[in-house]
Image (spheres, grey):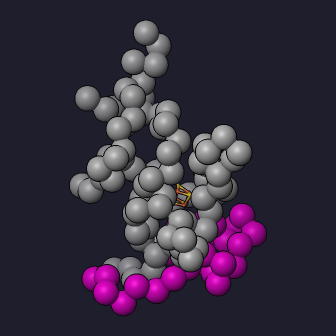
Amino acid sequence: MLDPRTFVCNRKCGECCIKFIVKLSKSDINAIKKEGYSEEDFVALDESLPEPTKFVLRKKANGRCVFLLKNKKGVYSCKIYDARPNVCKKYPFLKNKVDSCKPVMFKDLHR
Ligand code: SF4
């Protein structure tokens, strides 16, 4: 079973950053602004969401998070990793998870 204390994303498939709608709290927004981005760069409004927040991470036209990077080998990474929103920090330990997300357990990496 995956353990939040030892979890590392080893596949870097980027599926969560493509398929998930990431809700933003005020502190998430402030943390990203400290990285030098303005709200217009990354905040979108989703009126269909219930309170307390209707703010979500902006997606590109292709459906990918605006902060998602892909290198030439097809490996994804997050441009604002240290300042990423709380939802991203908790993933995949959330109620919902992307079906294709099948990370290897940390202990399996050391066998
Ligand atoms: S902020 Fe980073 S971790 Fe969160 S969805 Fe975007 S690319 Fe993925």
Q: Which residues are magenta?
A: 26-51
Q: Residue drawn 34% across and 47% down?
A: 100
- Label count reads 0
Q: Is residue 29 visible?
A: no
Q: Quadrant of the N terminus?
A: top left
Which residue is more in the foreground, 7 or 19?
19
Tell me which residue sits at (45%, 80%) in the image: 55
**Residue 16: horizontal and vertical position, in percent?**
43, 55
Observer-nearest of 89 and 66: 66
Q: Residue 8 or 100: which is nearer the viewer?
A: 100
Q: Residue at x 31, y 87 (%)?
A: 48
- In the displayed structure, would residue 39 be above or below residue 20? below
Q: Is residue 108 left or right of residue 35?
A: left
Which residue in the rendered view is the most extreme toward the top? Answer: 111
**Image quadrant where one finds the C terminus:** top left
Q: Where ligand 1 lies, by quadrant?
A: bottom right
Residue at 46% of width from left, 86% of height from top?
45
